[in-house]
Image (cartoon, rainbow, N blue to C red):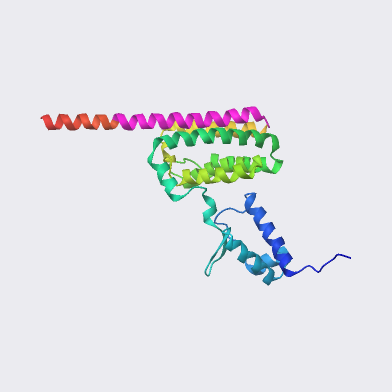
Amino acid sequence: MPFQKVSAAKLSTSVIRQIELLILRGVLTPGDRLPSERDLAERLGVSRPSLRDALSELQERGLLAAKAGSGVYVADALGSAFSPALVDLFSRHDEAVFDYLSFRRDIEGHAAERAARLGSDEDLRIIQTIYDRMEAAGDPASSEQAAALDAQFHSAIMDASHNVVMLHMMRSMLELLHQGVFYNRRIMFQRDTSREAILAQHKAINDTIQSRDATAARQAVEAHLDFIKTCLIEHQRAQRNAEIARQKLEKESEQR
Protein backbone atom coordinates (compact mmCIF):
# COMPACT_ATOMS: atom_id res chain seq x y z
CA MET A 1 0.00 0.00 0.00
CA PRO A 2 1.33 3.48 -0.89
CA PHE A 3 1.57 4.84 2.66
CA GLN A 4 4.56 6.57 4.17
CA LYS A 5 5.40 7.70 7.64
CA VAL A 6 4.66 11.33 8.39
CA SER A 7 7.99 13.02 8.98
CA ALA A 8 8.83 16.00 11.12
CA ALA A 9 9.23 17.96 7.89
CA LYS A 10 5.55 17.35 7.13
CA LEU A 11 4.59 18.68 10.55
CA SER A 12 6.63 21.83 9.99
CA THR A 13 4.89 22.31 6.63
CA SER A 14 1.52 22.17 8.36
CA VAL A 15 2.68 24.74 10.91
CA ILE A 16 3.93 27.01 8.11
CA ARG A 17 0.62 26.82 6.30
CA GLN A 18 -1.39 27.59 9.45
CA ILE A 19 0.69 30.68 10.29
CA GLU A 20 0.65 31.80 6.65
CA LEU A 21 -3.15 31.66 6.59
CA LEU A 22 -3.42 33.63 9.84
CA ILE A 23 -1.25 36.36 8.30
CA LEU A 24 -3.04 36.24 4.94
CA ARG A 25 -6.46 36.57 6.57
CA GLY A 26 -5.35 39.45 8.74
CA VAL A 27 -5.70 37.58 12.04
CA LEU A 28 -2.00 38.10 12.69
CA THR A 29 -0.90 41.63 11.83
CA PRO A 30 2.51 43.35 11.50
CA GLY A 31 4.14 43.72 14.90
CA ASP A 32 2.11 40.96 16.57
CA ARG A 33 4.25 38.82 18.89
CA LEU A 34 3.87 35.05 18.62
CA PRO A 35 3.47 32.99 21.81
CA SER A 36 6.61 31.55 23.36
CA GLU A 37 8.12 28.54 21.65
CA ARG A 38 6.88 26.15 24.35
CA ASP A 39 3.38 27.61 24.38
CA LEU A 40 3.07 27.69 20.60
CA ALA A 41 4.36 24.11 20.23
CA GLU A 42 1.72 22.95 22.74
CA ARG A 43 -1.07 24.85 20.99
CA LEU A 44 -0.12 23.39 17.62
CA GLY A 45 0.53 19.91 18.99
CA VAL A 46 3.99 19.63 17.45
CA SER A 47 7.49 19.16 18.79
CA ARG A 48 9.67 22.18 19.43
CA PRO A 49 12.21 21.13 16.73
CA SER A 50 9.39 20.96 14.16
CA LEU A 51 8.18 24.38 15.27
CA ARG A 52 11.69 25.85 15.04
CA ASP A 53 12.01 24.55 11.47
CA ALA A 54 8.71 26.19 10.55
CA LEU A 55 9.53 29.52 12.19
CA SER A 56 12.97 29.55 10.58
CA GLU A 57 11.48 29.09 7.11
CA LEU A 58 8.87 31.79 7.71
CA GLN A 59 11.66 34.15 8.77
CA GLU A 60 13.56 33.36 5.58
CA ARG A 61 10.44 34.21 3.60
CA GLY A 62 10.21 37.56 5.36
CA LEU A 63 6.88 36.86 7.06
CA LEU A 64 8.30 36.66 10.59
CA ALA A 65 11.17 38.41 12.33
CA ALA A 66 13.04 37.38 15.49
CA LYS A 67 14.09 40.02 18.01
CA ALA A 68 16.89 39.02 20.34
CA GLY A 69 15.65 38.49 23.88
CA SER A 70 12.11 39.43 22.90
CA GLY A 71 10.62 36.71 20.71
CA VAL A 72 9.25 36.20 17.22
CA TYR A 73 7.00 38.78 15.58
CA VAL A 74 5.01 39.19 12.39
CA ALA A 75 7.34 41.22 10.19
CA ASP A 76 6.76 44.98 10.23
CA ALA A 77 7.65 45.09 6.53
CA LEU A 78 4.27 43.52 5.80
CA GLY A 79 2.61 46.75 6.94
CA SER A 80 3.43 48.59 3.72
CA ALA A 81 2.96 47.66 0.09
CA PHE A 82 4.96 50.71 -0.99
CA SER A 83 8.68 51.37 -1.24
CA PRO A 84 10.17 54.19 0.86
CA ALA A 85 10.90 56.15 -2.34
CA LEU A 86 7.27 55.97 -3.43
CA VAL A 87 6.03 56.91 0.03
CA ASP A 88 8.29 59.97 -0.06
CA LEU A 89 6.95 60.86 -3.52
CA PHE A 90 3.36 60.58 -2.28
CA SER A 91 4.11 62.95 0.59
CA ARG A 92 5.41 65.68 -1.73
CA HIS A 93 2.49 66.07 -4.14
CA ASP A 94 -1.14 67.09 -3.55
CA GLU A 95 -2.17 65.04 -6.58
CA ALA A 96 -1.41 61.89 -4.61
CA VAL A 97 -3.64 63.05 -1.73
CA PHE A 98 -6.75 63.29 -3.87
CA ASP A 99 -5.96 60.12 -5.81
CA TYR A 100 -5.58 58.41 -2.42
CA LEU A 101 -9.04 59.58 -1.35
CA SER A 102 -10.54 58.53 -4.67
CA PHE A 103 -8.97 55.09 -4.33
CA ARG A 104 -10.24 54.72 -0.76
CA ARG A 105 -13.71 55.86 -1.81
CA ASP A 106 -13.95 53.12 -4.43
CA ILE A 107 -12.33 50.33 -2.43
CA GLU A 108 -13.87 51.06 0.97
CA GLY A 109 -17.28 51.62 -0.56
CA HIS A 110 -17.04 48.18 -2.13
CA ALA A 111 -15.73 46.72 1.14
CA ALA A 112 -18.63 48.18 3.14
CA GLU A 113 -21.06 46.75 0.62
CA ARG A 114 -19.44 43.31 0.94
CA ALA A 115 -19.30 43.57 4.74
CA ALA A 116 -23.04 44.24 4.88
CA ARG A 117 -23.73 41.27 2.62
CA LEU A 118 -21.03 38.77 3.55
CA GLY A 119 -19.81 39.70 7.01
CA SER A 120 -20.52 37.18 9.74
CA ASP A 121 -22.42 38.14 12.87
CA GLU A 122 -19.06 38.10 14.67
CA ASP A 123 -17.60 40.53 12.09
CA LEU A 124 -20.47 42.94 12.65
CA ARG A 125 -20.09 42.70 16.43
CA ILE A 126 -16.43 43.67 16.08
CA ILE A 127 -17.36 46.71 13.97
CA GLN A 128 -20.04 47.70 16.49
CA THR A 129 -17.63 47.29 19.42
CA ILE A 130 -14.98 49.47 17.78
CA TYR A 131 -17.56 52.11 16.89
CA ASP A 132 -18.81 52.17 20.50
CA ARG A 133 -15.25 52.61 21.77
CA MET A 134 -14.58 55.33 19.21
CA GLU A 135 -17.71 57.20 20.27
CA ALA A 136 -16.67 57.02 23.93
CA ALA A 137 -13.00 57.87 23.34
CA GLY A 138 -13.54 61.59 22.95
CA ASP A 139 -11.91 64.14 20.70
CA PRO A 140 -9.56 62.60 18.08
CA ALA A 141 -7.69 65.92 17.94
CA SER A 142 -6.42 65.37 21.47
CA SER A 143 -6.85 61.61 21.94
CA GLU A 144 -4.47 59.19 20.26
CA GLN A 145 -6.83 56.39 21.26
CA ALA A 146 -9.75 57.99 19.42
CA ALA A 147 -7.63 58.53 16.31
CA ALA A 148 -6.39 54.92 16.41
CA LEU A 149 -9.94 53.62 16.82
CA ASP A 150 -10.98 55.56 13.72
CA ALA A 151 -8.40 53.59 11.70
CA GLN A 152 -9.41 50.32 13.42
CA PHE A 153 -13.04 50.95 12.47
CA HIS A 154 -12.18 51.21 8.78
CA SER A 155 -9.84 48.23 9.02
CA ALA A 156 -12.56 46.11 10.64
CA ILE A 157 -14.85 46.84 7.70
CA MET A 158 -12.12 45.62 5.36
CA ASP A 159 -11.79 42.46 7.49
CA ALA A 160 -15.54 41.86 7.24
CA SER A 161 -15.43 42.13 3.45
CA HIS A 162 -13.50 38.82 3.38
CA ASN A 163 -11.24 39.75 0.48
CA VAL A 164 -7.63 39.25 1.56
CA VAL A 165 -6.13 41.38 -1.23
CA MET A 166 -8.31 44.37 -0.34
CA LEU A 167 -7.58 43.76 3.33
CA HIS A 168 -3.80 44.00 3.00
CA MET A 169 -3.86 46.82 0.48
CA MET A 170 -6.13 48.97 2.64
CA ARG A 171 -4.22 48.19 5.85
CA SER A 172 -1.14 49.46 4.06
CA MET A 173 -3.00 52.60 2.92
CA LEU A 174 -4.31 53.26 6.43
CA GLU A 175 -0.80 52.85 7.84
CA LEU A 176 0.46 55.55 5.46
CA LEU A 177 -2.36 57.78 6.68
CA HIS A 178 -1.39 57.06 10.29
CA GLN A 179 2.16 58.14 9.45
CA GLY A 180 0.85 61.44 8.07
CA VAL A 181 2.06 60.71 4.54
CA PHE A 182 -1.03 62.09 2.80
CA TYR A 183 -2.34 64.62 5.29
CA ASN A 184 -2.49 65.30 9.00
CA ARG A 185 -5.56 63.50 10.29
CA ARG A 186 -5.88 66.01 13.10
CA ILE A 187 -6.80 68.64 10.50
CA MET A 188 -10.09 66.80 10.10
CA PHE A 189 -10.95 67.34 13.75
CA GLN A 190 -9.91 70.96 14.28
CA ARG A 191 -13.46 72.32 14.07
CA ASP A 192 -16.34 71.17 16.23
CA THR A 193 -18.56 70.94 13.14
CA SER A 194 -16.08 68.62 11.44
CA ARG A 195 -15.76 66.36 14.49
CA GLU A 196 -19.52 66.11 14.87
CA ALA A 197 -20.03 65.48 11.17
CA ILE A 198 -17.35 62.76 11.02
CA LEU A 199 -18.79 60.96 14.05
CA ALA A 200 -22.25 61.12 12.46
CA GLN A 201 -20.78 59.70 9.25
CA HIS A 202 -19.17 56.82 11.11
CA LYS A 203 -22.50 56.17 12.83
CA ALA A 204 -24.22 56.03 9.44
CA ILE A 205 -21.60 53.59 8.14
CA ASN A 206 -21.98 51.38 11.20
CA ASP A 207 -25.78 51.51 11.21
CA THR A 208 -26.09 50.55 7.54
CA ILE A 209 -23.65 47.65 7.91
CA GLN A 210 -25.40 46.42 11.07
CA SER A 211 -28.73 46.50 9.22
CA ARG A 212 -27.08 44.69 6.27
CA ASP A 213 -28.16 47.37 3.81
CA ALA A 214 -25.33 46.94 1.30
CA THR A 215 -26.25 49.81 -1.01
CA ALA A 216 -26.67 52.27 1.87
CA ALA A 217 -23.38 51.10 3.40
CA ARG A 218 -21.50 51.93 0.21
CA GLN A 219 -23.21 55.31 0.00
CA ALA A 220 -22.37 56.10 3.63
CA VAL A 221 -18.67 55.41 3.05
CA GLU A 222 -18.66 57.46 -0.14
CA ALA A 223 -20.35 60.39 1.64
CA HIS A 224 -17.75 60.19 4.44
CA LEU A 225 -14.78 60.30 2.08
CA ASP A 226 -16.39 63.05 -0.02
CA PHE A 227 -16.62 65.09 3.19
CA ILE A 228 -12.94 64.44 3.98
CA LYS A 229 -12.03 65.63 0.48
CA THR A 230 -14.05 68.83 0.95
CA CYS A 231 -12.36 69.49 4.31
CA LEU A 232 -8.93 69.09 2.73
CA ILE A 233 -9.77 71.42 -0.14
CA GLU A 234 -11.03 74.02 2.34
CA HIS A 235 -7.91 73.61 4.47
CA GLN A 236 -5.61 74.05 1.48
CA ARG A 237 -7.58 77.12 0.38
CA ALA A 238 -7.30 78.59 3.85
CA GLN A 239 -3.53 77.99 3.85
CA ARG A 240 -3.16 79.72 0.46
CA ASN A 241 -5.28 82.68 1.61
CA ALA A 242 -3.21 82.97 4.78
CA GLU A 243 0.01 82.99 2.75
CA ILE A 244 -1.34 85.69 0.43
CA ALA A 245 -2.39 87.77 3.42
CA ARG A 246 1.05 87.31 4.97
CA GLN A 247 2.73 88.50 1.77
CA LYS A 248 0.47 91.57 1.62
CA LEU A 249 1.18 92.37 5.25
CA GLU A 250 4.90 92.03 4.63
CA LYS A 251 4.65 94.40 1.67
CA GLU A 252 2.71 96.95 3.71
CA SER A 253 5.33 96.79 6.47
CA GLU A 254 8.15 97.41 3.99
CA GLN A 255 6.40 100.48 2.54
CA ARG A 256 6.07 102.23 5.89
* Depth order, front residue of 201/179: 179
Q: Position of residue 59 (x, y in %)?
A: 58, 63
Q: Residue at x 57, y 36 (%)?
A: 108
* Depth order, front residue of 198/224: 224
Outermost residue, left side:
256
Magenta highlight on residue 135? no
Q: Residue at x 42, y 48 (%)?
A: 85
* Depth order, front residue of 252/133: 252
Give the dominant element type of the magenta stretch: helix, strand or loop.
helix
Residue 188 shows up from this direction: no
Outermost residue, front side:
2
In this rendering, the answer to whether 253 lies above or below 149 is: above
Which quadrant of the structure image shows residue 7?
Answer: bottom right
Magenta highlight on residue 213? yes
Which quadrant of the structure image shows residue 251?
Answer: top left
Q: Position of residue 232 (x, y in %)?
A: 42, 32
Q: What residue range appears in magenta?
A: 212-241
In this rendering, the answer to whether 175 lies above or below 74 is: above
Residue 163 shows up from this direction: yes
* Depth order, front residue of 194/225: 225
